[in-house]
Amino acid sequence: MLRSPVSFSWSSPEATEAFARALAPRLDAGDVIELEGGIGAGKTHFARALILARLAAPEDIPSPTFTLVQTYDCADGIEIWHADLYRLSHPDEAIELGFDEAFENAICLIEWPDRLADLRPTSALRLKLEASDAAGERLAVATWRDPRWAKKLEGLLP
């Protein structure tokens, strides 16, 4: 059984997409993935691939940098919230946006989750991404407390 944390790498943007597509069908309402890393680390790239894997038909997946949140209705009726919280000035703004309810009823992909402070769900999967010296490669660390993530990630991580 997998134990947190797990360090691994994706050799290319296509490998990042493949991981996101493989993880997508394993997610349920109430699953939160925190995407950490600097600008250009691959957070939005990962989120787009995961969202596209859950949609009934392809559509444009814009970055939520300026809108803060983009929502998507999946074919199975579960909603996905993709958030970029970089511009949040206070964690209470996340409640005003409806995240308290989304954390229970939707799949949430949260970029810049540190902006949530104490509102960060303890059951979330944290993926910390960073670029490596090799072109296109991403180094990643997956961390979780909730044991359900070990089962969801089984066979996907080294």
Image (tube, rainbow, N blue to C red):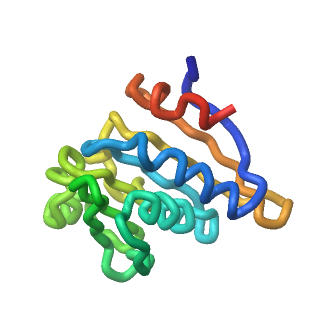
In this picture, residue 26 sits left or right of residue 81: right
Q: Position of residue 16 (x, y in %)?
A: 64, 56
Outermost residue, top side: 1
| Res 112 visible | no
The mark total stands at: 0
Residue displayed at 38% across by 71% down: 57
Residue displayed at 19% across by 44% down: 104
Q: Quadrant of residue 54?
A: bottom left
Residue displayed at 36% across by 82% down: 66
Q: Is residue 57 above or below residue 24?
A: below
Q: Nearer the viewer, residue 26 or 114?
A: 26
Q: Is residue 4 above or below residue 103?
A: above
Residue displayed at 84% across by 60% down: 133
Q: Position of residue 73 (x, y in %)?
A: 26, 64
| Res 127 visible | yes
Where's the C terminus, which quadrant?
top right
Q: Position of residue 109 (x, y in %)?
A: 39, 56
Q: Is residue 5 above or below residue 129?
A: above
Q: Nearer the viewer, residue 76 or 141?
A: 76
Where's the N terminus, which quadrant?
top right
Q: Position of residue 101 (x, y in %)?
A: 14, 51
Outermost residue, right side: 134
